[in-house]
Image (cartoon, helix red, strand yellow):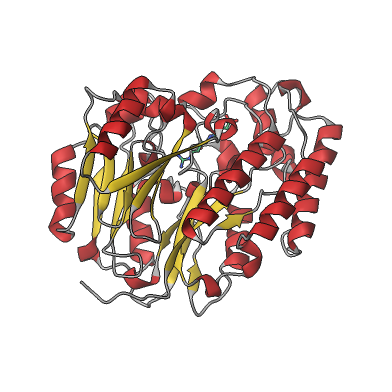
Amino acid sequence: MSETNASLTEINFDGIVGPSHNYAGLSLGNIASASHKGDPSYPRAAALQGVAKMRGNLDRLGVQGFLLPLPRPNNSLADALAYDGTEPAGLRAAPWSASSMWTANAATVSPAPDTADGKCHLTPANLVTMLHRAQEWPDTKRMLEVAFGDRDHFTVHDIAPMTFGDEGAANHMRFCEGHGSAGVEVFVYGRPGGRFPARQHEQASRLVARRHGLDPARCVFIEQNPAAIEAGAFHNDVVAVANERVLFTHAEAFADQASAYEAIRAVFPALEIVEVPSDIVTIEEAIRTYLFNAQLVTQPDGTMALIVPEECRESASVWAYCEGMLAGNGPIKHVIPVDVRQSMANGGGPACLRLRVVCDPRSVDPRFMLDDAKADLLEQTIAAHYPEQIDPADIGSETLARTVVTARKQLLAALGITQLG
Ligand code: SUG
């Protein structure tokens, strides 16, 4: 294996939940989104849950970043949709979506040890499959260019051409001996034609790998199991997660499970697979509880922890599996439940809420790095300015628009970020 660059660390950049967080049922194929459609949402609680998760990870890992909510309502999208009252409600809700909180879909990231020019490459995701998500990339790209503006260390690319759906890091896994050493990057794509859209296209994954300057011999392209997509795994990160040598996966994640393992092992022989069998946790229960939409992290003492949603603890089969796993001799030594229920109700677990970037923390714009004082500041600003509740009928209201715009402005002002107003 290549040498390790000790200055490189994995940083989780969590999306701060935006003040317009709501349940509009916009994501076909995402069961939580569909089943919570029309429920009242609680943006203040949602954002505070997110900050609490970040605080926990800051304590645990010593480093934590964040990305900001995007400007909402998006008036230019609203104008483009030419409302006259005949449009479906989903079209009215799209410009209000706070979906950029799920930063696992913000971009695909290839860290410096994997790339030909030794820089960290980021390609913002075009998210073309869903209208409410397709509006994100221009603002996301601008933000990535600020947060990762140091051109000696980072290259932020254009999005993939819109013909090819790209949903970013949610369909990308990286295997390595340690985060600072050269990795093997695994891209998981869906084949279209099923009941639900396959949101990650193979050619998007392949062009991202080429433009990031990855060694083709250290890239693996794997098809997602169409049955998993049918069951509601609209991204690979709903059924599998990787960290260093470890792949934690459901037995039905990939179209051909054995060949997928073989293909990764062929280029990364140290691979350790923790496979959860279907007769222990069904794919439906895995998707309902988001056991795999977990953050699998290496703690400073070298042990691995799995940060799962609280919903896992409430499921008899999932929790029994976790307890059995901890009693065994596997690589995952801790399972830590966190409360992100407001995000979960829209299909976003702990892993959806973060974008992993392996880099030298000193190369990141410090305004996007969390410390305790900034966590306090975020909490105060959220508590003072975020709406407590949004009912479906509030979407489109002038009063709510003013509240949402002001809350975001206050957040940016508190953090001293002026470029993204
Ligand atoms: O794109 N939900 C998001 C959830 C994204 C989860 N991300 C990862 N798995 N990485 C989505 O489907 C629901 C919005 C609504 O219905 O109002 C939504 O967009």
Q: Can the viewer see residue 254?
A: no
Query: Between residues 365 and 382, which one lies in front from this camera angle?
Result: 382
Q: Is residue 353 left or right of residue 1?
A: right
94 shown above or below 284? below
Residue 214 pos. (x, y %): 31, 67
Residue 78 pos. (x, y %): 72, 38
The number of numbered badges drawn on the structure is 0
Q: Quadrant of residue 234?
A: top left
Residue 49 pos. (x, y %): 61, 39
Query: Between residues 87 and 401, which one lies in front from this camera angle?
Result: 401
Q: Can the viewer see residue 207?
A: yes
Residue in the picture at 72% in, 47% down: 379
Q: Is residue 280 left or right of residue 377?
A: left
Residue in the picture at 20% in, 50% down: 272
Q: Quadrant of residue 20?
A: top right
Query: Between residues 92 and 309, which one lies in front from this camera angle?
Result: 309
Q: Name the residue at the bottom extreme.
A: 152
Query: Between residues 119 and 335, which one lies in front from this camera angle?
Result: 335
Quarter of the image with the C terminus is: bottom right
Quarter of the image with the N terminus is: bottom left
Residue 38 pos. (x, y %): 64, 19
Residue in the picture at 28% in, 25% down: 281
261 shown above or below 86? below
Q: Name the residue at the front extreme.
A: 327
Residue in the picture at 13% in, 56% down: 266
